[in-house]
């Protein structure tokens, strides 16, 4: 792939905070960004162009594509077929094939297992009868998760016993799902990996990820020894997945650190909240390396820029502390420009780097 010259336009599907931070990284390298989304959002404030349209509106996507030299996404819950069609007119990275796999919990679990990854025992569930059968096979406690369109713990219900089956099925909207055994884990961590157009890969040291109410609350690097011990195996798996998909861009795999080794949970075909710490905490950020990869530039180094880095999400009313945080020496405050601080909404984050 020939490197895209500065001044080229990168199209981004999605207008959220990931698109905003991708746009900032793109601007630094001399590129322009053009957003495609049904409604404007945090990314629009920092992007030169905008096409409003539904993610499955082929006509609007074609207009968008005509403005772009390359297209990427910051949001994976988009219909894969129109994106594949768009890919016939303009390069799309990561590829629509990788997107299709990462959108579907069944596809991604099968794919990662084929690559040698360990997953929690799971069964597909398409009806209450299949749920009963899966419960008999998997046992409890277990989690029912919709196969598609889940994020931040949404589309999930926990089951402590068979008596929870009907309520769990209703809670996830009676949609195709998987029943997954609850993993006994000590820690959660992620591998954020970039793969360049030339096939070179670089991954960041894995953060320890702590969740509250199914939403990432904090990422810390370096992670404790129990995670560090599983780093090599998890990073090698992520590398094989990226290679097999012919992936270009940043790919994230989430893991549970269990006594048996890393257990793959899910993957995201994009930059990830657990990689926000890399903006100030790594030599090259996940956003910059994603832009570098999709534009055909060499990847930057991914080592730590300090001795310890902590990224804390500002969820809902936590962002009200912005002035206090802005006054804290060395705290890097990021606000996403969202006007309404609804509970559970990611409003910003703050990163602290110990040198
Ligand atoms: P997910 O949307 O699959 O990332 O799930 C959100 C969060 O729920 C995870 O980060 C875990 O904290 C928890 N979780 C999901 N699946 C499991 C599992 N099989 N065992 C234990 N905890 C889980």
Image (cartoon, rainbow, N blue to C red):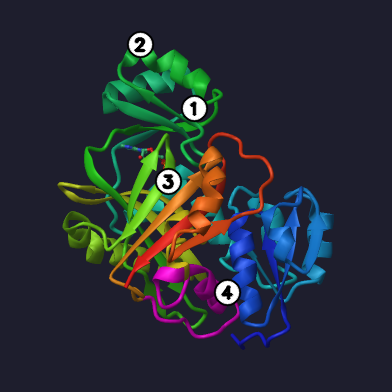
For the C terminus, the quadrant is bottom left
Instruction: Please give the residue where the numbered disc 3 appears in the rendered image.
Output: 216
Q: Position of residue 173 (x, y in %)?
A: 56, 24
Is the residue under label 4 in contact with that under label 1 (CB below 8 Å)? no
Instruction: State which tag comes first along the sequence, 3 or 1.
Output: 1
What number is the disc on residue 174?
none
Is the residue under label 2 in contact with that under label 3 (CB below 8 Å)? no
What is the quadrant of residue 211 in the picture? top left
Instruction: Please give the residue where the numbered disc 2 appears in the rendered image.
Output: 163
Name the mark nearer the viewer: 3 or 4.
3
Instruction: Please give the residue where the numbered disc 1 appears in the rendered image.
Output: 126
Instruction: State which tag comes first along the sequence, 4 or 2.
Output: 2
On the question of residue 74 being in view, the answer is no
Instruction: State which tag comes first along the sequence, 3 or 4.
Output: 3
Magenta-colored stretch includes residue 279: no
Q: Position of residue 194 (x, y in %)?
A: 45, 71
Measured in 3D between alpha carbons, the distance from the residue under mark 3 to the one under mark 1, in whole angstroms, is: 29 Å
Q: Nearer the viewer, residue 20 or 229?
A: 20
What is the quadrant of residue 192 in the picture? bottom left
Name the mark nearer the viewer: 3 or 1.
3
Q: Nearer the viewer, residue 39 or 115?
A: 39
Magenta-colored stretch includes residue 282: yes
């Amino acid at each position: 792939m020939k490197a895209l010259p500065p001044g080229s336009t990168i199209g981004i599907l999605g207008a959220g905070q990931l698109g905003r931070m991708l746009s900032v990284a793109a601007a630094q390298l001399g590129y322009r960004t053009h957003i495609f989304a049904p409604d404007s959002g945090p990314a629009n404030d920092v992007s030169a162009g905008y096409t409003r349209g539904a993610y499955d509106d082929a006509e609007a996507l074609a207009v968008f594509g005509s403005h772009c030299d390359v297209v990427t996404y910051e949001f994976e819950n988009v219909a894969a077929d129109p994106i594949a069609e768009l890919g016939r007119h303009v390069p799309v990275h990561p590829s629509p094939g990788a997107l299709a796999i990462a959108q579907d919990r069944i596809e991604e679990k099968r794919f990662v297992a084929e690559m040698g990854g360990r997953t929690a025992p799971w069964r597909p569930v398409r009806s209450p009868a299949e749920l009963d059968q899966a419960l008999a096979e998997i046992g409890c406690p277990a989690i029912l998760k919709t196969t598609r369109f889940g994020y931040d713990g949404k589309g999930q219900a926990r089951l402590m016993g068979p008596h929870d089956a009907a309520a769990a099925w209703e809670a996830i909207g009676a949609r195709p799902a998987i029943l997954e055994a609850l993993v006994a884990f000590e820690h959660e961590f992620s591998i954020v990996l970039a793969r360049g157009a030339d096939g070179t890969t670089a991954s960041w040291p894995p953060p320890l990820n702590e969740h509250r109410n199914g939403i990432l609350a904090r990422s810390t690097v370096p992670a404790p020894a129990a995670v560090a011990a599983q780093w090599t195996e998890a990073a090698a798996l992520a590398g094989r997945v990226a290679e097999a998909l012919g992936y270009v861009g940043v790919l994230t795999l989430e893991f549970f650190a269990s006594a048996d080794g890393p257990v793959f949970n899910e993957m995201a075909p994009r930059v990830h909240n657990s990689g926000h710490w890399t903006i100030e905490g790594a030599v090259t950020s996940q956003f910059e390396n994603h832009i570098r990869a999709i534009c055909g530039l060499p990847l930057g180094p991914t080592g730590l820029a300090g001795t310890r880095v902590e990224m804390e999400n500002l969820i809902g009313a936590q962002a009200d502390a912005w002035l206090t945080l802005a006054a804290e020496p060395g705290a890097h405050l990021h606000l996403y420009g969202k006007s309404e601080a609804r509970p559970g909404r990611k409003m910003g984050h703050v990163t602290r780097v110990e040198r």
